[in-house]
Image (cartoon, coloured by chain):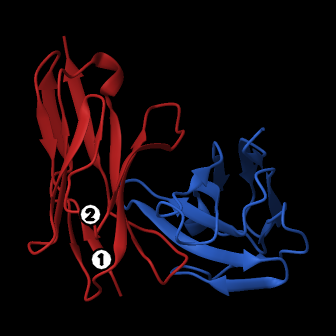
Amino acid sequence: NAGVTQTPKFRILKIGQSMTLQCAQDMNHNYMYWYRQDPGMGLKLIYYSVGAGITDKGEVPNGYNVSRSTTEDFPLRLELAAPSQTSVYFCASSLRGGSLGSPLHFGNGTRLTVT
Amino acid sequence: AQTVTQSQPEMSVQEAETVTLSCTYDTSESDYYLFWYKQPPSRQMILVIRQEAYKQQNATENRFSVNFQKAAKSFSLKISDSQLGDAAMYFCAYRSSGYSTLTFGKGTMLLVSP
């Protein structure tokens, strides 16, 4: 199993550009998540999904969009990139709640810089 | 909403010594899960240990153990016989049994010196 795969690992965007961060998991997990990590701020939830076709906003959804057409894939779309979106982005997945607390399995992150 | 507080931005320990990282949380629920994640410089998020709130026994994983005080809403991580490879950012996280999302603290940077 590859686990959670995120691409790209690094990206530099100009203000106003758009891009999609890709995330795929091969563990047949129901739940998938996007977090952003800023220095000294921990991880903040952007969006999450409890299954194909179902998505919901997290704590910091503004400026982002997601879709979940399959169980495996959960891309994050940035429209009109802004410097405030400079961050490290993590995709994660987990089983449906109840199984030993269903810990999150993380991808290796994408470092995004918007200039 | 649940909150998770890690009051120590940075901690230092010498090799072979023991260090304790603090975490408190706020919740009105009785059934939930707590986690400690490690993030080394590689940026990878690694699960260190987990605790189910309904279990009174503290979880242990090799050199890592927790002190879970449910009434005090405290969940500290003890690292024994510290090693250079333990140097990392450590995050405490909370998950309600009825919710799908995880709430993280801001993290504690652990420095390990020879």
Tag 1, which secondary structure? Answer: strand
* SS for dot 2: loop
Q: Chain B shown in which color?
A: red
Q: Looking at the figure, which quarter contains the N terminus of chain A?
A: top right
Q: Residue at x 64, y 66 (%)?
A: A34
Residue for point 73% across, 83% down = A55
Up/down of B56 relative to A79, above or below? above
How many badges with numbers are in the image? 2
Q: Which residue is mark 2?
A: B55
Asked if A114 appears above or below A34 in the picture, the reply is above
Q: Position of residue A37 (x, y in %)?
A: 49, 57
Q: Nearer the viewer, residue A8 or B58?
A: B58
What colour is chain A? blue
For label 1, the crowd category at 10 Å Cα-Cα, with few meaning under 14, some 14 to 19 and many 20 or more, is few
Return the residue at label 1: B3
- As drawn, the residue found furthest toward the right would be A69
